[in-house]
Amino acid sequence: MDNNKIQTKKIIITFWIVLTALWLHANNVQITNVSFKPNTNTIKFDISWDNSWRSSILNNWDAAYVFIKYYDPASGTWLSANFTDQNNVIPAGFSVSEAPGVGRFIFRSESGSGISQLVNVELGIESRIAQGIFDVKLFALEMVYIPVIDFYLGDQASNNSYRSSYLNLAPDLMFKNDESFVFDPLPEEYVEIANTASFYVMKYELSQGGYRDFLNSLTYSQQVNHTASLPTSPSGTFALAPSTINYRNYIKIKTPAQLINGAYTPAVYGCDSDFNNVYDELSDGENIACNFVNWVDHAAYLAWVGLRPLTEIEFEIAGRGIQYPAKNEYAWGNAEIGDDQYFVFDAALNTEYVNNPEPNPKGNAIYEATVNSLNNLDGPVRNGIFATASSNRVKSGGSFFGVMEMSGNLRERVITTANVQGRFFNKNTFPGTYLNDLGHAFLATSWPGARVDPVFPNIIDGSIPALGLIYRGGSWNDESFYLCISDRSATIFGNNTNRDPYTGIRGCR
Ligand SMILES: [Ca+2]
Ligand SMILES: [Ca+2]
């Protein structure tokens, strides 16, 4: 009865599909046909993503991390809706993770590879959400499962590479997981390796479409702190990039914020790489990795989706896997890297590709030698640009476990072991998945840059130094050595509030 009443009131329910892609070459997850089933308290949808796998040999698979936001009229904000793990319906050959955490992982339960295509998935949700009276957004991110393994740290060659002892550089003495400490040359001391556990890491750097969707779920006051241009700026203004040069960031203000009855409405953001003032077309760059994000943005995004930063130890584990280190190796497991400028076609389309990838044994990556500003390549590229249905690890530039763009494209902030603040980081503390009124992550206990505040404890607002971070993997503008999986050249100082064109967002949990 209530449900009928609600429908006669014509309350509009909107479904937001993130990271959508329709064409060949596209790697990104797609959600369609979303509906609610009030009788079973479930949300029903179809989901698919490309280049999916599960390997029983490596005990490794990829997954779609799904999470729900609903609009809370009382607070005027988008909040997380909880999954109940009741009445789940999952097609044969797939599984879904259960609590804890705000989101759920959908993944192959049997070995295989190719497109993952699931129809009529149902996941149990709070009954009030299943009634269909709220505006709801269902999001998905592709992630990769990293099992507990024996691993090596350092490659005995890269700058500040980990090693097993203070002086001994002999390869047979490199650190392995059956030891407890590793020598970190940055603080010149041994650091304890926390108990390792399996984790999921984002398969790609966060896309511009993903960050756009985040901005479109914030209030005006929250948007102010996660963009470079005021939300009241004219339509067509770059949200993150400078007006002079945008380095392939195409997120713009689509509809400016407006002052109505003394309060600002949020701006609406969209991608428009072809400058035709039609936003979020397939040709508008939303699958390109998102640059111009600072640590305050990064922390807030991760908190909002229920993820956390990686540690630099996890970065090397996800990159190298179980393999013995090769000196100066990149994410694809050897020290050979292409150094010819790439020619990019279908630029900013969801089919964006490079028509001259390097042949074996050289791996492919976007960095100083391969960018080509004359060919519209002066910034990051589409996530997974080198991965195709037939590409191997070297050609795709993927890591041992299939994580993409760990070498190059955008550099990645991770938690360092090089100072006490980084070593204080607790992987098991997650903020509450909602942000404070100003859009900042809080309850981010032990995260770098978290300061004590009487109202919002452990808030990350950029007001104090973000001690405990380091950049890993290098960017499109870096020399090749920065891209090595063990390179530790790029330490981070200061508050890390500058938005630069070189740094992106990756998270894990
Ligand atoms: Ca357009
Ligand atoms: Ca990267």
Image (cartoon, rainbow, N blue to C red):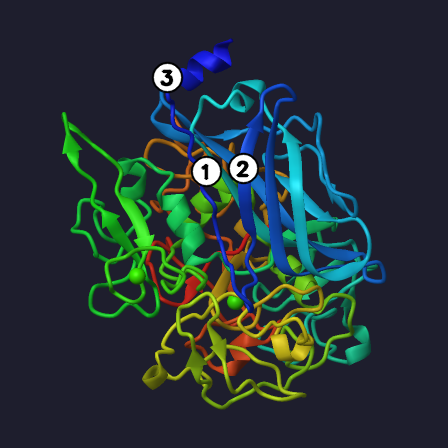
Packing grade of label 3 (10 A; few <14, some 14-19, many >=20) is: few
Q: Position of residue 179 (x, y in %)?
A: 81, 60
Contact? badges 1 and 2 (CB < 8 Å): yes
Q: Type of residue at label 3? A: Lys
Precedes in sequence: disc 3 or disc 1 = 3
Label total for image: 3
Query: Residue 324 at x, y = what percent?
Result: 78, 74
Rate crowding at label 2 as few (under 14), some (14 to 19) or many (20 or more) other CA atoms within 10 Å: many
Q: Disc 2 designates what residue?
A: 34
Tell me what residue is drawn at x 73 percent, y 50 percent.
198
At horizontal 61% and vertical 66% (from top left) the residue drawn is 188
Q: Which residue is mark 3?
A: 9
Task: Say the numbered circle drawn on residue 224.
Answer: none
Say which element carries label 1. loop
Residue located beneath label 1 in the image: 15
Could you tell me if residue 102 is visible in this image?
yes
Image: 334 above or below 64: below
Q: Quadrant of residue 386?
A: bottom right
Q: Earlier in the sequence, mark 3 or mark 2?
A: 3
Hey, what amino acid is under mark 2?
Val
For disc 1, the neighbor class at 10 Å (few under 14, some 14 to 19, many from 20) is some
Label 1 amino acid? Answer: Phe
Horizontally, residue 40 falls left or right of residue 307, namely: right
Instruction: Describe the element under mark 3 as helix, strand or loop.
Output: loop
Residue 325 placed where, x, y %? 73, 75
Tell me where residue 42 sits by quadrant. top right
Closer to the camera in the image, 277 or 424: 277
